[in-house]
């Protein structure tokens, strides 16, 4: 700490030797050195955002509609993709990038339903970032795909900050998770374009309070379209497909 | 947990700026983090202490300024600082507001020694 004015800056004394071979004047009127301040003024996410913009350009050039799928683990992101592939896969042309800490399981499930898929195993990392997606795209055969799903790592916190270059953010929440998830994990819901309430077939069994859930989502994400679905029974899926069709056409 | 990745970006950006100014070391790194940024300052600090080893920032201090939530009420046409993003305007009691601050995640400045 600076011992002259308590500014917290490093102490720089003028009684030491300089070994750079020339002399210079140290007679500054304030008698001690505060160091130099370099203004940077950059978003910490600027690196990621640059990659995201490149991805967005690539997606636009290919005419792809790209959705970032976000939720806790087990809300049904992979099941949503599987169901969509079974019902509409041939019709739309769908490709998938899927992120998990470990295993190829999800990519295998998706390939088994006939779609090209690349698995990103993040190791210990809790979210996908735009740079990882860019590399995954190098290995993905997009063919005639019109839709690309980016299935994020199951996590309601960290992925919120990272733009991947997508056109739509789709957040899933299942009835078994309770009605107050949007309030507890507001940042991820706040930027959602669509919120899917999944496993609606279980709502009655688990005593899901539908009104409360919708009120909570509206509170955090008034802009989001809310769809109630069951990837298992197919209930409400038509509204999801209508959303995808509108998005492709755009 | 994503604080490690964010801190890595902070360090990369800081080292680049320091090198551009031919700094021999970085004495301090100043960040501004919004209350709604979803970032835990303690976790950033911890990540910083792990990642700075062997870099120009090895002995640097990390200074985090937290930015409160700032909302702008459309009806009253004035700013207010709510406790969380669900708190309505204290003047009119309505929730018709725009979020204008609290999501910041910025590297503001660096302190480097004056003499190269």
Image (spheres, coloured by chain):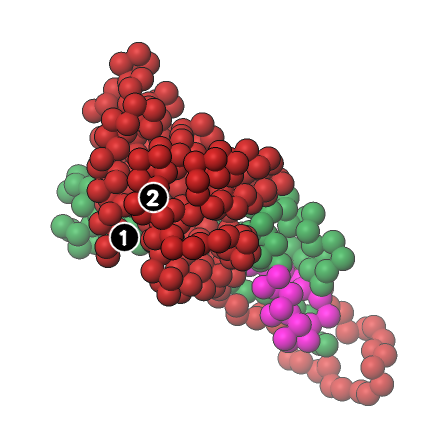
Chain colours: A red, B green
Distance CA(mark 2)–CA(mark 1): 14 Å
The verdict on residue A3 being magenta is no
On the rendered image, what quadrant is the C terminus of chain A found in?
A: bottom left
Q: Is residue A180 above or below residue B32?
A: above
* A18 on left or right of B63: right
Q: Residue at x 39, y 49 (%)?
A: A148
Chain at tag 1: A
Q: Residue A248 carries which label?
A: 1
Image coordinates of residue B58 in percent, x first then y, are 72, 57
Chain at tag 2: A
Q: Residue A161 carries which label?
A: none
State how many labels appear. Answer: 2
Label 2 Cα neighbours within 10 Å, binned few <14 / some 14-19 / many ≥20: few
* Disc with the residue nearer the chain's start (2 vs 1): 2
* B11 on left or right of B84: right
Q: Residue at x 22, y 37 (%)?
A: A239
Q: Residue at x 35, y 34 (%)?
A: A86
Q: Which mark is residue A90?
A: 2
The image quadrant that residue A216 belongs to is top left
Q: Residue at x 67, y 64 (%)?
A: B26
On the rendered image, what quadrant is the N terminus of chain A found in?
A: bottom right
Image coordinates of residue A155 in percent, x first then y, are 47, 36
| Magenta highlight range | B12-32
The nearer-to-camera label among 2 and 1 is 2
Q: Is mark 1 on a helix, strand or loop?
A: helix
Q: Nearer the viewer, residue B88 or A109?
A: A109
The image quadrant that residue A171 belongs to is top left
* A59 on left or right of B107: left
Image coordinates of residue B15 in percent, x first then y, are 64, 65
The image quadrant that residue A102 belongs to is top right
């Amino acid at each position: 700490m600076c011992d002259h004015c308590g500014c917290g800056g490093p102490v720089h004394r003028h009684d030491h030797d300089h070994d750079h071979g020339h002399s210079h004047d140290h007679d500054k009127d304030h008698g001690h050195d505060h160091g130099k301040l370099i203004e940077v003024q950059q978003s910490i996410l600027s690196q990621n955002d640059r990659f995201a913009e490149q991805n967005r350009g690539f997606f636009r050039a290919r005419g792809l509609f790209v959705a970032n799928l976000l939720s806790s683990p087990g809300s049904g992101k992979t099941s949503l993709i599987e169901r969509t592939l079974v019902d509409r896969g041939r019709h739309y042309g769908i490709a998938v990038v899927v992120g998990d800490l470990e295993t190829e399981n999800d990519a295998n499930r998706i390939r088994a339903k006939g779609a090209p898929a690349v698995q990103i195993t993040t190791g210990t990392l809790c979210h996908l970032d735009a740079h990882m997606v860019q590399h995954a795209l190098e290995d993905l055969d997009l063919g005639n795909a019109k839709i690309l799903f980016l299935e994020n790592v199951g996590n309601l916190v960290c992925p919120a900050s990272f733009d991947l270059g997508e056109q739509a953010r789709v957040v899933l929440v299942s009835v078994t998770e309770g009605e107050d998830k949007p309030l507890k994990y507001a940042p991820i819901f706040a930027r959602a374009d669509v919120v899917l309430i999944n496993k609606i077939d279980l709502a009655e069994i688990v005593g899901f309070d539908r009104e409360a859930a919708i009120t909570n989502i509206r509170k955090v994400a008034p802009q989001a379209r809310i769809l109630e679905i069951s990837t298992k029974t197919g209930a409400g899926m038509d509204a999801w497909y209508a959303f995808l069709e509108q998005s492709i056409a755009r | 947990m994503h604080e490690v990745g964010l801190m890595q970006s902070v360090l990369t950006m800081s080292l680049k700026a320091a090198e551009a100014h031919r700094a021999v070391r970085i004495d301090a790194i100043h960040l501004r983090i919004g209350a709604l940024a979803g970032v835990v300052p303690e976790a950033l600090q911890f990540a910083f202490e792990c990642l700075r080893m062997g870099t120009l920032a090895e002995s640097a201090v990390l200074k985090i300024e937290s930015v409160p939530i700032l909302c702008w009420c459309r009806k009253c046409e004035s700013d207010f600082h709510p406790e969380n993003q669900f708190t309505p305007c204290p003047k009119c009691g309505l929730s018709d507001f725009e979020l204008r601050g609290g999501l910041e995640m910025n590297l503001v400045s660096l302190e480097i020694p004056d003499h190269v």
